Image: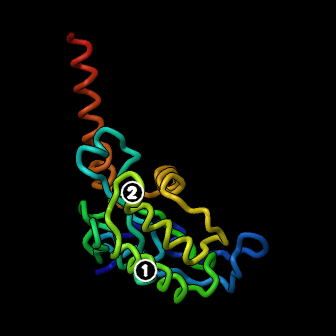
Amino acid sequence: MTTNPSHQSQEDVQITMGGSGAGSGGVGAPERLPAINTAEQRFPYCIVWTPIPVLTWILPVIGHMGICTSAGVIRDFAGAYFVSEDNMAFGRPTRYLRLQPNFVEGGSDAWDEAVSKASVLYGTRIHNIFCDNCHSHVATALINMRYKNSTGWNMLILSMWLFVCGRYVGIGGVLKTWLPFVVLLTFCILLSVYF
């Protein structure tokens, strides 16, 4: 199935520009990134996000996160001792954040190895919503690959980065993310005005 052009950003279809110097992590030559295909849920080199019912309705910045391989396969820490593959715990992604493999020394192979190692590690852990969760799994993968030559990735940084810079998969992603919050907020405002 082909990707809907409305779901592709300019960065998805053009050659990515590499950098050099500090923070590049041994950047090699720029490489062409595979296209994102939202219909088939393929998000190469992306962090993906989906709302958690009730929790996201109250605080839209909170949701469930996963990280994708170079082929776009989604890996997410879905519960105690379980990292799922291509079946996110709370449904299809509504947002994604495209990362750049040229910020990983070793490119695609190092990316996939880091995602795999993080997934194996989190397959041995108990899920803790506050301390060791899906965001921690993604942060561990980024630390393993030394993304942007950094080992300082954590759930707070990732939450804010995706919330501010993430792209929606389409109008359905926007509605699934924000409609329950808007309805709940409207109900609370009407209730407070009435009483």
Residue 62, image x, y percentages: 38, 48
Q: Which residue is mark 1?
A: 69
Residue kind at label 2, given as amino acid type: Tyr
In the drawing, does residue 15 fall left or right of residue 179? right
* Residue positioned 42% across, 63% down in the render: 96
Residue 161, image x, y percentages: 53, 54
Q: In the picture shown, does residue 24 fall above or below 185?
A: below
Q: Does the CB distance between marks 1 and 2 fall below 8 Å?
A: no
Dot 1 lies on which element? Answer: loop
Please count the marks in the image: 2
Q: In the picture shown, does residue 146 fall above or below 186?
A: below
* Residue positioned 24% across, 34% down in the render: 183
Dot 2 lies on which element? Answer: strand
* Residue positioned 29% across, 35% down in the render: 182
Residue 63, image x, y percentages: 35, 53
Q: Where residue 91 is drawn, which disc sits there? A: none
Q: Is residue 132 visible?
A: yes
Q: State the residue in front, 20 or 54.
A: 54
Residue that extends furthest to the right in the rendered view of this protein: 21
In the drawing, does residue 51 fall left or right of residue 68? left
Residues packed near mark 1 inside 10 Å, few (<14), some (14 to 19) or many (20 plus): many
Q: State the residue in front, 75 or 125.
A: 125
Quarter residue 89 falls in: bottom left
Q: Which residue is mark 2?
A: 168
Quadrant including the C terminus: top left
Cα separation, mark 1 vs mark 2, equals 19 Å
Residue kind at label 1, given as amino acid type: Thr
Q: State the residue in front, 151 or 15.
A: 151
Residue 181, image x, y percentages: 29, 38
